[in-house]
Image: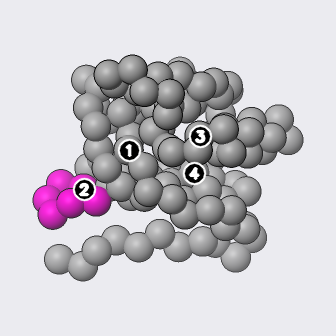
Amino acid sequence: MAKKVYEVKQDEQLFKKVSGDCWKMPKLSINRQVSGKYYFTDKRIAFLASGLVGTESVSWEIEMKDIEKVKTCLTPPFFPFGILITMKNGDKYKLSILKRKKYFEWISEHVSK
């Protein structure tokens, strides 16, 4: 099986590709750590899970324009790496990234546009 690759669209700019974990997403009813790569563009945030089997079911992509709010949070057990994104439809995503301040500020800046 070929590994899925994230493609940047012609009308968007890639800000950063970074490794991290996702702890919460609408597809999963429980909080669970899924490792992968985040892709931040000026229009979208995408998470491509890494692993051998079932990664497509826990990979996702969201539009910046659909984000309601963003705040920092803890990730299990009590690490200060989390960014909690709440969508306008109520869905929540909990990202875990080292140097979260940089990404939190970047997301916050693009949500307010």
Quarter of the figure with residue 55: bottom left
Q: How crowded is mark 3: few (under 14 residues within 10 Å), some or many (20 or more)?
A: some
Spatial separation of the CA atoms under disc 4 and disc 3? 14 Å
Q: Is residue 39 visible?
A: yes
Q: Can residue 65 be seen in this view?
A: no
Which comes sooner in the sequence, label 1 or label 4? Answer: 1
Which comes sooner in the sequence, label 2 or label 1? Answer: 1
Q: Which amino acid does label 3 sit on?
A: Arg
Task: Quickly name the residue at label 4.
Answer: 45
Spatial separation of the CA atoms under disc 1 and disc 4? 14 Å
Q: Foreground mark, 2 or 3? A: 3
Q: Is residue 19 above or below residue 104?
A: below
Task: Quickly name the residue at label 2.
Answer: 55
Task: Quickly name the residue at label 3.
Answer: 100
Which comes sooner in the sequence, label 2 or label 4? Answer: 4
- Identify the magenta region: 50-55
Q: Residues within 10 Å of mark 2 (few under 14, many from 20)?
A: some
Q: Percent position (x, y) of residue 11?
A: 74, 70
In the rendered structure, the answer to whether residue 89 lies left or right of residue 64 reads left
Spatial separation of the CA atoms under disc 1 and disc 3? 12 Å
